[in-house]
Image (cartoon, coloured by chain):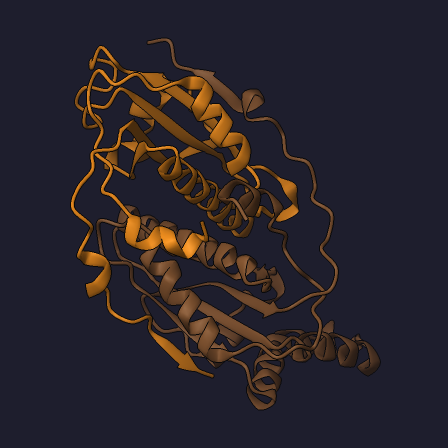
Amino acid sequence: MPLSDFIMDSNTPVSVHNYPVSQQLVLELLNHAVWAPNDGLREPWRFIYVDDQSGNTMLGLQESAPAHLIMVMKEDSDHHKRDEDFAAVCCLIQNFQLLAREKKLGVRRTMPEWIYDRERTRPFGVQEKERIVAILDLGAVEQTPTAASAATLPEPKFELL
Amino acid sequence: MSLTALIRERRSIRKFNDVPVSQGLVFELLEQAERLYDHAEKVSLRYIYAGTPDSRNRLVDYMMEPMTASRLGKLIPDKMLGIFKKRFVDIPAHVIVIAETAPDRRRSDQNYADVCSIIQNFQLLGWERRLGMLWDTESIIQNEIFFKRIGIGEGERFVGILHIGYFDKTPKGRARTLAEKKWTVFQG
């Protein structure tokens, strides 16, 4: 199926409790997703997997989901490289979301306030020279009626030089 | 092509052939790229397209201006500048991507992340049509002079230029580190 056919097929993924997420599937998808473009092959990412079937591990931080994937990025001292690295991690996440959609694994990408708070990120093992780019809540995809939103999106803002 | 193959086989392209690229196709793929991205909030971005010989010339002059204006730049032989210029002017199409920023860091990051994800969709959709791209963020062009020339305003940031064209040779991929080696399971 061509990628463009994915568009109207887009579901709003809703994570459901007690749905077992397979670590093996997540790793399999990540091993494809790491083919994201990244400058100088720096591969500035790493992943912290949080099994949260008990619902307690990320209570108060994230909406409940059977598992969370913390997307961590190395923070280069050069701000320009840092921007490139951030972009690379975003490409990886986008790859992962597309692949997950195909496998009916629900992914909710979040960038909540707490990921900027070192006091809160440290307990998960995030180092000083690292930051969290996003938290992916993983679970089952709940089928919803085809999104009408796609049709109402405004046209891209496209000017000529 | 399967999605997995598409993601794994896409390459950044640096050497393009001279087959023309249709502006309509670029626009259509950008539209698809935006639709393919699931987003809760509105993504604020805009594109500037250079696809005619005249606009490509202007774009490359803008890219080179910081280089030629600097004292060091004046030492670069004209012949070398000529080669640099030709290399980029010959590429059939260029899309400048500009994102809005916000006073709030989290919101700015969020919009930048959304824009980067849309660009990745665009690169994949392009690859499906045999369109190659290079997402150019070279530090040499990340310069106030260049930003002013292309009209980046207050509350905006430059995300990159996508150089776009068809190509004859697919570069070899560079192996990636296994995800397992970058994987930790959190033990509460």
| Residue B37 visible somewhere in the drawing | yes
x and y percentages locating residue B98 in the rendered image? 41, 67
Q: Colour of chain A?
A: orange
Residue at image coords 48%, 24%: A27
Q: Nearer the viewer, residue B129 or A26?
A: B129
Residue A127's place in the image compared with B53, above or below, is above
Query: Residue A9: image x %, image y %?
Result: 29, 49
Indicate the quadrant where residue B99 lies: bottom left
Q: Residue at x 73, y 47 (%)?
A: B172
Q: In the image, is A45 to the left or to the right of B38?
A: right
- A88 vs B20, left or right, is left
Residue A133 in sight in this render: no
Seen in the image, is A72 located left or right of residue B168?
A: left
Q: Please state the horizontal and vertical placement of residue B19, each as a whole percent of the image.
A: 66, 77
Residue closest to the far front: A1
Vertical side of A144 occupied by B90: above or below: below
How far across and down, in percent of the image, does residue A116 sit? Answer: 31, 35
